[in-house]
Image (cartoon, rainbow, N blue to C red):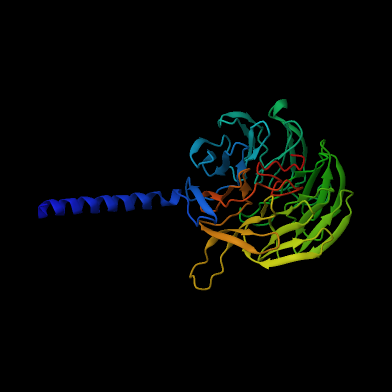
Amino acid sequence: MKPTKVLLLSGLLLVICLLTLLVFKWRAPQAETGSLFGPRIRWSYTPGPDPLSGIALAPNGTVHFSAADGIYALSPQGRLLWKAPPPSGPVIAAPALAPDGTLYAASRSGNLFALDPFGNLIWQSVGTRHKFFTPPALGAGDALYVTDDYTDLFAFSPSQGPGLTWKQSTFSPTGSKDDVLLGNNTSYGSVYGAGTYRSSPVIGADDMIYLAHQQWLYRLNLHGDVLWFIQLLSQRPGFPAIGRDGVVYIDGPPWFFAIGHDGKQRWIVRTSNRLQGSPVIDNDGVIYFCDSDFVKALLPDSQMKWSVQADCNSGPALAADGTLYLGMRGREPEQVTRPMLLAAFAPDGQLKWKIEIQGMVREAPAIAPDGTIFFTTDRGYAYAVSAAGPPSMDSPWPRFQHDAQNSGHSRF
């Protein structure tokens, strides 16, 4: 073969190799990463750099989340199915998915709205002139319950029109002491800005509503009547979780409370700081939560089962084998900047694995029936991670707002 032909052939092979490497490098962020037997990033998707809400996961695997410019729906493979612009202002809270496939979202401008499974607007509530920062809880039928930035409680029923079904108002511009129904209102700063108050109503298996507000925990019926209330030793209660026996677990830094369904305190323990997200509860009644620099497990009688140091930044999600998935920050001393991670902890508190991601996980991951873990970050990324694990645990409270659909209802 002539030297000229050899050179041309060698050059052609070099170009093919370089193109192959470039294509592989371009596809790498979308491809699976990690070891063969460890966690693998199946895909990542980003609509932009702004933080994303938590996930609402449909039974068919469709992934829903809120972004600055609307509600997104992705296929289980990470492809965009549709994007729906918000009809009445930005949505910060994660959407909630009803059993019939209707997606409900609460906007920061004080409206609720509903989308069908194809992203079409099918209902919108009247404006409340308040701000919604958390998902609505899904009651019987199409009943919706949502709290605003001052923790007023609103009830809607789309089948009855756009108006309010009822409201429990708690805010007085003058700070009147007559605001005794749900406590005197003040506001405090948070990651969502000064004056916001993040709290969600949750619904027990008996369809009773539980609402934390200021230093109070309330139990209400479906008509909005207060059945009992109990004063907590804190003015900033977090997100409640409901056990199988109706016990409500809730933090109010620096305390963690167990309140019986009769409104009486069962026990109280001290925590290090405000919990991230809500506690989760397994089928043995063990309570797991992220307490700032620790992941902790408490027995039903409040005794510590284990405590592991971990700089966690989201509440956990509980898998059927007892594995806890949550977001955390790495502590590797040799690294200049601490990496952001998704981590898995065994039921005994041992770290099973961790995988580096772009941004901080703020809300609990969602676990699909095939064990895939879906979550979002504050840098605008949605992720799917495969870890050859089981689905979500069918326990009293395996995740923030109870389930991957964010129903907030233990009956679901």
Quarter of the view holding residue 208: top right
Query: In the rendering, at what x and y percent does residue 402 appear?
Result: 71, 46
Residue 142 pos. (x, y %) = 72, 31
Q: Is residue 250 above or below residue 59?
A: below
Asked whether, in this view, residue 125 is left or right of residue 205, the answer is: left
**Image point (61%, 41%), residue name:** 57
Q: Quadrant of residue 403?
A: top right
- In depth, the one of 393 and 364 nearer the eye is 393
Q: Residue 322, how many percent across, how many down?
A: 70, 54
Q: Residue furthest top?
A: 160
Q: Residue at x 58, y 47 (%)?
A: 372
Q: Visible in this render: residue 406? A: yes
Look at the image and tell me in which quarter the C terminus lies. top right
On the question of residue 272 being in view, the answer is no
Considering only vertical position in the picture, is 291 above or below 91?
A: below
Position of 26 with respect to 51 (left or right) is left
Disc tally is 0
Vertical arrangement, residue 293 with respect to residue 201, above or below: below
Residue situated furthest front in the rendering: 1
